[in-house]
């Protein structure tokens, strides 16, 4: 067994060591490209999205180009103390616009959400529906946007309460993400996503802290298909009581060889404790222009 383990480690690491000795060509200088001087198509980065799974990538959209990333359909179900909550999103588009070579701005809003809360004891189901909350974001890449073993970015956001009560909580909230991506041996990629949020208190006025993070491993099973395995955790420090959530997430993305600006993806998130939705399933698309 020890020999087999040693062989497996060597199989993973030796090719990576050999590649490290090979000179890496310098990426093209794209610092002069802006919204009004777009990056030529020949210099575009490979399509990079913030989906599937919960992870946010440190990559940005090339200057002068825009990108749409959206759930086609998203279904979440959670049961706690005899009450089942089912949430459906009928599309959930994020629009991104590249301002410079390493900065983009992003807007996200779900045009229609439906939240059904069923009380098993009384048999009563309450339904809320309407437009979702509006999220405004900016992503600034500080390292590795055009390649390299490490990439890092900062992404602050603010949530504008556009959703009706029952779908949203009617409060302005904000936060920041700091996604890190590492290239691992054997073509694996690791994304680490620390996040800090200021959320509205569940009762009364004021805000409280929320922190979350994840480890997301991505692997290209073919030249066009990438799978993702992810562990996510969240701690909400509301004054009424701390709530901790955790999930194990699976995702897959397909970028056709003849359509490098298009991605089709899907996945499922599985809750690991009672406070986390038991299951969330989704299908989505992305397109760069």
Image (cartoon, grey):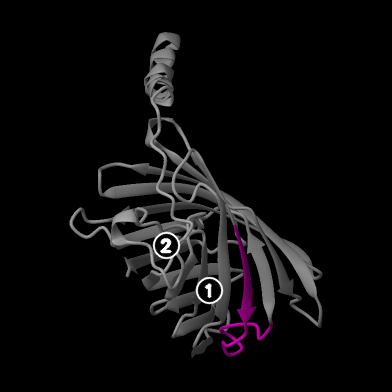
Instruction: Magenta stretch: give its range.
Output: 154-171
Query: Residue 22: where, in percent of width, then height?
Result: 38, 25
Residue identified by numbered label 2: 62
Q: State which quarter of the image contains the N terminus.
A: top left
**Does residue 153 appear left or right of residue 21 in this picture?**
right
- Is 156 included in the stretch rendered in magenta? yes
Query: Residue 3: where, in percent of width, then height?
Result: 41, 9
Distance of mark 1 from mark 2, alpha carbons?
A: 43 Å
Q: Residue at x 44, y 85 (%)?
A: 111
Compared to residue 135, the image places residue 143 above or below, namely above
Q: Residues within 10 Å of mark 1 (few under 14, many from 20)?
A: some
- Is 179 included in the stretch rendered in magenta? no
Disc number at residue 84?
1
Q: Earlier in the sequence, mark 1 or mark 2?
A: 2
For the image shown, how many numbered marks are present on the structure? 2
SS state under label 1: strand
């Amino acid at each position: 067994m020890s020999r087999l383990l040693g062989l497996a480690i060597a199989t993973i690491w030796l090719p990576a060591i050999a590649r490290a000795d090979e000179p890496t060509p310098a990426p093209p200088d794209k610092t002069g490209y802006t919204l009004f001087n777009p990056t030529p198509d020949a210099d575009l980065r490979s399509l990079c999205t913030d989906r599937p799974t919960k992870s946010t990538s440190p990559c940005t959209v090339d200057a002068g180009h825009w990108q749409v990333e959206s759930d086609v359909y998203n279904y979440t179900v959670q049961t706690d103390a005899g009450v089942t909550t089912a949430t459906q999103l009928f599309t959930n588009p994020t629009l991104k616009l590249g301002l410079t070579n390493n900065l983009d701005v992003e807007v996200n809003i779900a045009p229609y959400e439906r939240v059904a809360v069923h009380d098993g004891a009384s048999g009563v189901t309450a339904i809320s529906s309407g437009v979702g909350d509006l999220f405004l974001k900016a992503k600034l890449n500080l390292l590795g946007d055009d390649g390299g073993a490490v990439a890092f970015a900062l992404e602050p956001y603010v949530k504008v309460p556009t959703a009706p009560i029952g779908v949203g909580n009617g409060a302005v909230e904000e936060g920041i993400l700091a996604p890190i991506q590492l290239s691992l041996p054997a073509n694996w990629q690791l994304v680490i996503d620390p996040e800090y949020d200021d959320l509205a208190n569940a009762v009364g006025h004021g805000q409280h802290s929320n922190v979350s993070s994840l480890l997301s491993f991505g692997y290209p099973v073919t030249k066009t298909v990438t799978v993702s395995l992810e562990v996510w955790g969240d701690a909400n420090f509301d004054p009424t009581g701390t709530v901790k959530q955790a999930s194990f997430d699976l995702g897959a993305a397909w970028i056709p060889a003849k359509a490098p600006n298009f991605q089709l993806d899907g996945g499922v998130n599985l809750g690991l404790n009672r406070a986390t939705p038991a299951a969330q399933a989704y299908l989505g698309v992305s397109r760069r222009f």
